[in-house]
Image (spheres, rainbow, N blue to C red):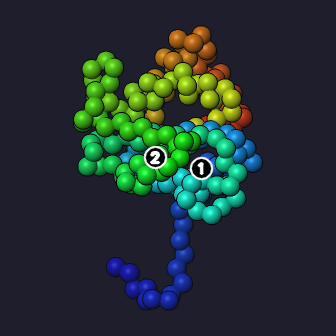
Amino acid sequence: HCDAKPGDEVKMTGPSGKVMLLPEDKPEADIITVGTGTGIAPFRSFWKRLFVEDTEARANFKGLFWLFLGVANTDALLYDDELQALAKANDNFKLDYALSREQTNQKGGKMYIQDKVEEYADDIFNRLDKGAHMYFCGLKGMMPGIQDMLKGVCEGKGLDYDEWIKGLKEKGQWHVEVY
């Protein structure tokens, strides 16, 4: 029950901090975003800022924006029309969906977000080596599968996973906001 009336002042709180900020001082940096379900929310603000609104960030952005979105099925896709239009209109806007109940991964199982990201592991690791920023947002249950996949990719590349992640964190390229 809320007894506030129109015009009343209300105090609002929410997540705060610097985890989900764009590196606007590096407009050439690629932005790789990985979201599940409502975890798409901060990334919508990113694509609006970089491709839709009249902002300095949009004027200066020279990198690639890559959105990976994981949902159960096509019916659950969020902002699909908007995203498809942006991908069609911008060469530097990439869009990949992981639809766990409709697609299968390379091993024949359900297509989860980590499986879709793994398909592009070489490209992503290459971009991260060149300064890309990678963002994860969604239910915290998504991270173990992503971490296991990245560990496997690191092993295949002869990299120490813990050192690799530590390096990305130290350079401010690794952003995780899960709940």
- Residue 25 visible, this orientation: yes
Against 159, residue 121 (above or below) is below
Against 109, residue 11 (above or below) is below
Name the residue at 37% across, 51% down. 80
Q: Quadrant of the N terminus?
A: bottom left
Residue topped by disc 2: 88
Q: Residues within 10 Å of mark 1 (few under 14, many from 20)?
A: some
Quarter of image, res 165: top right
Q: Is residue 35 left or right of residue 105?
A: right
Q: Which mark is residue 159?
A: none
Of residues 17 and 52, which is closer to you in this image? 52
What kind of element bears circle 1? loop
The percent position of residue 142, horizontal first and vertical second, equals 41, 36
Q: Is residue 44 left or right of residue 63?
A: left
- Residue 136 visible, this orientation: no
Q: Is residue 92 left or right of residue 140?
A: right
Name the residue at 41% across, 42% down. 69
